Image: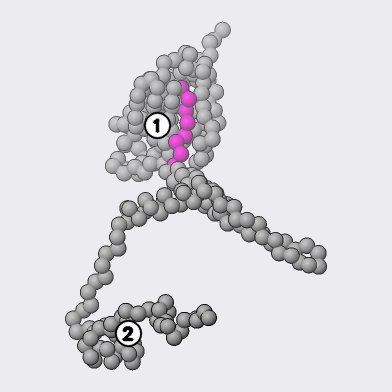
Amino acid sequence: MAKASVPQNLAAGNPNFDGNPPVPTPPGTDMTSICFRDQLWLNTYPLDRNLVFDYFALSPFYDWTCNNEQLRMNSIHPLDMTQLSKMTGIEYVLSEVMEPNLFVIRKQKRDSPEKVTPMLTYYALDGSIYQAPQLCNVFASRIGRSLYYISKAFSTAASKLEKVGYVEGESEGAAADLKTSKETIDLKEVKRVDYILASLQRKLGPAPPPPPFPEGYNPPQPPETENGSEEQQQGTEPQLSAVDPIIDQGPSKRLRLE
């Protein structure tokens, strides 16, 4: 009986190849919510820089239309940069390696031997493959989280400020008596506000003096009363009376007791 043989050019690139290549389906752009792990493969083959790409090819992140797959079909190592640099299109390169725990694989588009455009990044951490999030998604997530906490802080501050002073009025029957509740003051909040104001005053320091007036500028003088103008013309300052006109009104103004 003739023994069925698997084509060598297909089986060489994939140690787990069973003779039926999967249907080429391009992976999605955002697949950060899933991860891939094949424990049977990890128990059979060592995960190193030579076989990590074959392990990555089993994952749903792999694009079967890439240039690396063409090299595998020709029994060439899929990460051979001397061959990849001569091709154009989508390719995968191994950017960082920390055997046997971390492998970073970058998906990029090659237009020429010198011009490449990065597209996505994947990493295999302890045998599990993930897609790294894009930088714009990281910024959007961090900014959204910051805005949430800022809004929550303002809501908490507003609710505490309402408790500092609260007056409630009620009316009962035809008399419509106004009842005001006592102000509820939280001494801890008052002390906290005083501490914050004092710390800000120490940090800011005294206000700087105002700048001098420019040359030739005469500042407007305040309006003067008639008494003030007469005293200025005499060149003497007004003298305060030694007798208080309210306290000491003289014997003629005092009450006489008979």
Asked if the stretch drawn in magenta spans residue 129, the answer is: yes
Q: Residue furthest right?
A: 174
Q: Quadrant of residue 56?
A: top left
Kind of residue at badge 2: Pro
Mark 1 surroundings: few (<14), some (14-19) or many (≥20) residues within 10 A: many
Q: Which residues are magenta?
A: 127-134
Task: Give, as a three-letter code, the residue at label 1.
Answer: Ile
Q: Residue at x 34, y 42 (%)?
A: 116
**Quadrant in which the N terminus appears:** top right
Where 252 sits versus 173, above or below? below
- The percent position of residue 160, horizontal first and vertical second, equals 55, 51
SS at badge 1:
strand
Residue 232 belongs to magenta span: no
Colour convention of the picture: one colour
- State the image quarter where residue 165 is shown: bottom right
Residue to which mark 2 is pinned: 222
Quick one: label 2 or label 1, which is nearer the N terminus? 1
Tell me if 72 is positioned left or right of 147 in this view: left
Residue drawn 42% across the image and 83% down it: 251
Residue 64: image x %, image y %?
A: 48, 33
Q: Nearer the viewer, residue 111 or 75?
A: 111
- Residue 171 spot, x, y in % from top left: 75, 63
Secondary structure state at the residue bearing disc 2: loop
